[in-house]
């Protein structure tokens, strides 16, 4: 009885983890650890710079 | 024949005088803390020229070298401070 | 109603966007640009009635030049999406440059409201701008704003926006007669535009401090960006940052935090009781809670670190670092521009690699993309912290030196690339805007820290959780799906996969299947190294190693792992300097756009990791014990093979020019 419960709990945890990953991928999140993955060349972390309008 | 030789000599003399009169000074040779007027941006890179233009660095505008940090030059253009390298400083003729 | 936000880079657009939408987008003190537009709904409190206003934060643009070779998101957006109103964010301390773009926007026929941002900086410099007159000359409302603060000007801004909605926009400058295909005409027209701007500014702005004069800031720059001092100062600063996060403040908070995790685990353990299958309870307690808990335990350290880095960046120091490093980078065929992706890489390598798009020179761009992952990223921090804590007594030198080793490897790598591809004399212009030094915004740093923390926790709860569960299962069962007996761990699935690979790594000092398994899972996410080690060794608390000894009954974690300090260092370096994670490799693939470079890059990273770990282990063991480490000879052979191949590539380049085309094309 206890075993079954455990299996259920573990499966639930694993399933929700997988679900979360799938949802993020659908939203376009490329890297899960990145706070702003909506932008493709985001400045992950606190330091960003993209002098994009000029390529030098 | 004489005429051509004379013309040739005059042209050479004129050329020499022009070179001595207007010695090319770019930002590398410029004095620190002095305002200069940009005469030309000497580069084949159009994108660079365009970019510099949008910053306000083009013929007729003023630029000042604020300090020299090793091989890099801190310049002021239109109220902003930029750090440029030697290659770029050489391309800005004042 | 659609509102578009645009303006020069670093004018404060994103800050303003955050202020009016209440979102937490990311801001930097570089002349930074948002790569893609961000949308958000303006706060109801500002827009008054029930009007739904979406605001789009567009990338910063200096102008809408028709000649830039890349697509201009701003121009396209405005042409395609037809916003109702445009908010032009203008840096008040730099009217003469900013208004160029403004006049272009005014010509579009869409109502414009100018947000005169950073007005507080002007007050400090005693620069006065006659807002009323400026508004008159431009023909549009001008609202003074200060986007970091108590919503100063925001209400007025939004109400102006709403008021201006259906109005017709006039323009002080008319360039409609200009043929955009003709460069000369455009140039001439642009010059006239600048003249107009100059006139406006001279009548409207009164400065006390002339910007073309040296100021105290320049004196500071001379020290901070000095050729040699600059590097020293940078080292000290980084050491300080690490010290606070890894040695003092971080572990202090982490201790309590980990204590909670431990209690939680104990509570669950009690809840489960003894009557259930040990396999299942182990999966839950050790695999899931234990593994994830071990990783999450490092959260406080990471948060403190990112908080400090955010402060550093916000005050404007990082731009000076780029200048300092430029000198070293120039010697290896790169420029200071390459520093930017690398600094982004200290957060996460993937956006760092993508940021290389701004580097024009193909070879430099690819080299930078390939080398950026050498900078320790956020995911590598728990690994560093773990080893610093267990083997080196939380010393801040471990972390700091890893960053410098990373930089050293980057320089070596760049040098190798230059020698192999042979292209050294391409002129590359380096230009970096030096923002004014300012007191960093604590609020911003906190927000940055929290958003990173959130991302970390999400990652831990998903990717790392799954990996740990799988690892736990793989170590519990053998291939026949029987439970592995105590003492016979080598027969587990996990061990049987990792062991063959472990043989290759014996010369590096850690040819043990547990460590190898951890390193392999590290390719999915670097934090997994910590998680897997926790699962495989049954350790859940890496922070308070003293208490751990009491709990686990082992003498200490170090001996549990069976590593000497030297071997531990080698292992750490191996994990830090090999390809980081599959996602990063994916980003490299996208940016490098060339299979030869991609495989070259991966091979280089693997080779470097091996090389560095090998020498650290062998030489370190020689120094500390007087004897050489295991597997010296095979390792040496492998190293010689690698070095030989590299030398071959360099020679080949000299004799067959076509290789150069292949590699640089």
Image (tube, coloured by chain):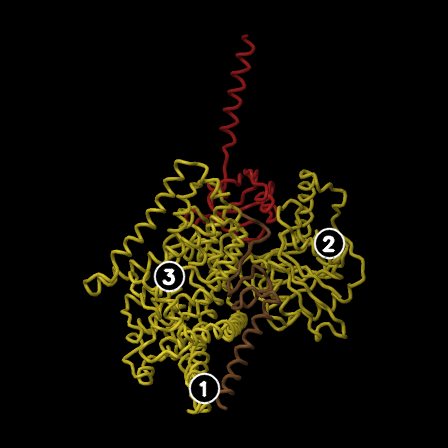
Chain colours: A brown, B red, C yellow
Q: Can see residue B66?
A: no
The N terminus of chain C - image quarter:
bottom right
Q: Left or right: C589 with respect to C84?
A: left
Q: Nearer the viewer, mark 2 or mark 1?
A: 1
Residue C264's disc is 1
- Crowding at label 2, few (<14), some or many (≥20) Cα neighbours within 10 Å? few
How far apart are labels 2 and 1 at the CA level?
Answer: 56 Å
Residue C111: give x, y in percent of width and height.
76, 59
Q: Left or right: C353 with respect to C110?
A: left
Q: Earlier in the sequence, mark 2 or mark 1?
A: 2
Residue C235's disc is 3
Under circle 1, the secondary element is helix
Q: Earlier in the sequence, mark 1 or mark 3?
A: 3
Q: Which chain hosts label 1? A: C
Residue C49: give x, y in percent of width and height.
77, 75
- Crowding at label 3, few (<14), some or many (≥20) Cα neighbours within 10 Å? some
Q: Please give the name of the residue rendered at 31% of the width and 53% of the height, measured from the top-left corner.
A: C639
Q: Please give the name of the residue rendered at 36% of the width and 62% of the height, measured from the top-left corner.
A: C574
Q: Which chain hosts label 3? A: C
Q: Please give the name of the residue rendered at 37% of the width and 72% of the height, measured from the top-left corner.
A: C386
- Occupied quadrant, residue C266: bottom left
- Crowding at label 1, few (<14), some or many (≥20) Cα neighbours within 10 Å? some
Q: Left or right: C509 with respect to C410?
A: left
Instruction: Name the residue carrying label 2.
Output: C79
Q: Nearer the viewer, mark 1 or mark 3?
A: 1
How far apart are labels 1 and 3 at the CA level?
Answer: 40 Å
Under circle 2, the secondary element is helix
Residue B37: give x, y in percent of width and height.
56, 41
């Amino acid at each position: 009885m206890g075993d079954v419960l455990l299996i259920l709990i573990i499966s639930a945890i694993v399933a929700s983890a997988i679900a979360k990953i799938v949802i993020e991928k659908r939203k376009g999140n490329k890297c899960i650890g990145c706070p702003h993955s909506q932008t493709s060349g985001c400045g992950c972390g606190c330091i960003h710079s993209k002098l994009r309008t000029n390529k030098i | 024949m004489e005429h051509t030789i004379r013309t040739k000599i005059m042209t050479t003399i004129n050329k020499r005088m022009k070179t001595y009169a207007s010695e090319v000074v770019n930002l590398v040779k410029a004095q620190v803390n002095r305002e200069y007027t940009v005469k030309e941006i000497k580069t084949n890179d159009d994108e660079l020229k365009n970019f510099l233009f949008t910053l306000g660095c083009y013929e007729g505008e003023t630029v000042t070298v604020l300090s020299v940090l090793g091989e890099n030059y801190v310049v002021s253009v239109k109220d902003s401070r930029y750090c440029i390298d030697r290659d770029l400083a050489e391309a800005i003729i004042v | 109603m659609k509102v578009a936000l645009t303006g020069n880079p670093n004018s404060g657009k994103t800050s303003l966007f955050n202020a009016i939408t209440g979102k937490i987008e990311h801001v930097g003190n570089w002349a930074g640009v948002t790569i893609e537009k961000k949308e958000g709904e303006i706060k109801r409190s500002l827009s008054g009635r029930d009007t739904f206003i979406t605001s789009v934060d567009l990338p910063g643009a200096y102008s809408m030049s028709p000649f830039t070779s890349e697509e201009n998101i701003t121009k396209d957006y405005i042409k395609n999406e037809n916003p109702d109103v445009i908010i032009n964010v203008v840096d008040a301390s730099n009217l003469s440059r900013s208004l160029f773009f403004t006049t272009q926007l005014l010509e579009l026929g869409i109502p414009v409201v100018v947000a005169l941002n950073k007005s507080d900086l002007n007050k400090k410099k005693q620069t006065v701008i006659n807002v009323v007159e400026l508004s008159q000359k431009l023909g549009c409302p001008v609202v003074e704003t200060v986007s970091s603060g108590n919503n100063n000007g925001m209400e007025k801004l939004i109400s102006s926006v709403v008021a201006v909605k259906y109005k017709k926009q006039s323009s002080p400058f008319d360039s409609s007669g200009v043929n955009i295909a003709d460069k000369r005409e455009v140039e001439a027209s642009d010059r006239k535009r600048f003249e107009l701007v100059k006139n406006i500014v001279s009548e409207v702005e009164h400065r006390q401090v002339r910007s073309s004069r040296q100021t105290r800031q320049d004196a500071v720059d001379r020290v901070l960006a000095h050729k040699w001092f600059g590097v020293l100062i940078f080292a000290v600063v980084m050491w300080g940052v690490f010290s606070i996060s890894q040695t003092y403040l971080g572990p202090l908070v982490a201790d309590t935090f980990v204590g909670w995790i431990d209690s939680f685990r104990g509570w669950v353990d009690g809840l489960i009781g003894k009557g259930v299958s040990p396999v299942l309870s182990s999966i839950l307690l050790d695999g899931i809670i234990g593994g994830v808990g071990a990783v999450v335990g490092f959260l406080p350290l990471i948060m403190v670190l990112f908080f400090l880095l955010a402060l550093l960046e916000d005050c404007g120091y990082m731009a000076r670092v780029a200048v300092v490093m430029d000198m070293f980078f120039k010697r290896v065929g790169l420029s200071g521009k390459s520093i930017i992706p690398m600094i982004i890489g200290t957060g996460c390598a993937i956006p760092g690699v993508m940021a290389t798009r701004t580097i024009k020179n193909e070879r430099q761009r690819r080299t930078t993309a390939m080398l950026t992952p050498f900078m320790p990223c956020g995911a590598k921090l728990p690994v560093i912290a773990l080893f610093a804590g267990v083997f080196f007594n939380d010393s801040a030198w471990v972390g700091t030196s890893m960053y410098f080793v990373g930089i050293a490897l980057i320089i070596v790598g760049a040098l190798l690339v230059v020698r192999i591809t042979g292209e050294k004399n391409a002129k590359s212009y380096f230009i970096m805007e030096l923002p004014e030094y300012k007191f960093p915004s604590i609020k911003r740093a906190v927000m940055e820290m929290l958003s990173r923390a959130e991302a970390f926790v999400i990652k831990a709860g998903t990717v790392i959780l799954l990996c740990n569960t799988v690892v736990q299962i793989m170590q519990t069962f053998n291939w026949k799906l029987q439970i592995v007996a105590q003492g016979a761990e080598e027969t587990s699935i996990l061990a049987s996969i990792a062991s063959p690979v472990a043989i290759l790594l014996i010369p590096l000092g850690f040819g043990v299947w547990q460590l190898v398994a951890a390193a392999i899972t590290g390719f999915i996410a670097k934090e997994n190294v910590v998680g897997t080690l926790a699962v495989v060794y049954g350790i859940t608390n890496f922070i308070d190693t003293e208490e751990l000894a009491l709990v686990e009954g082992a003498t200490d974690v170090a001996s549990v792992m069976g590593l000497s300090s030297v071997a531990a260092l080698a292992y750490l370096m191996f994990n830090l300097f090999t390809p980081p994670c599959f996602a990063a490799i994916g980003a490299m693939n996208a940016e490098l756009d060339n299979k030869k470079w991609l495989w070259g890059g991966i091979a280089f990273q693997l080779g470097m990791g091996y090389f560095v770990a090998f020498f650290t282990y062998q030489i370190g063991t020689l120094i500390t014990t007087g004897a050489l480490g295991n597997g010296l000879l095979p390792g040496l052979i492998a190293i010689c093979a690698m070095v030989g191949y590299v030398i071959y590539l360099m020679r080949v380049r000299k004799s067959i020019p076509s290789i150069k085309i292949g590699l640089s094309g």
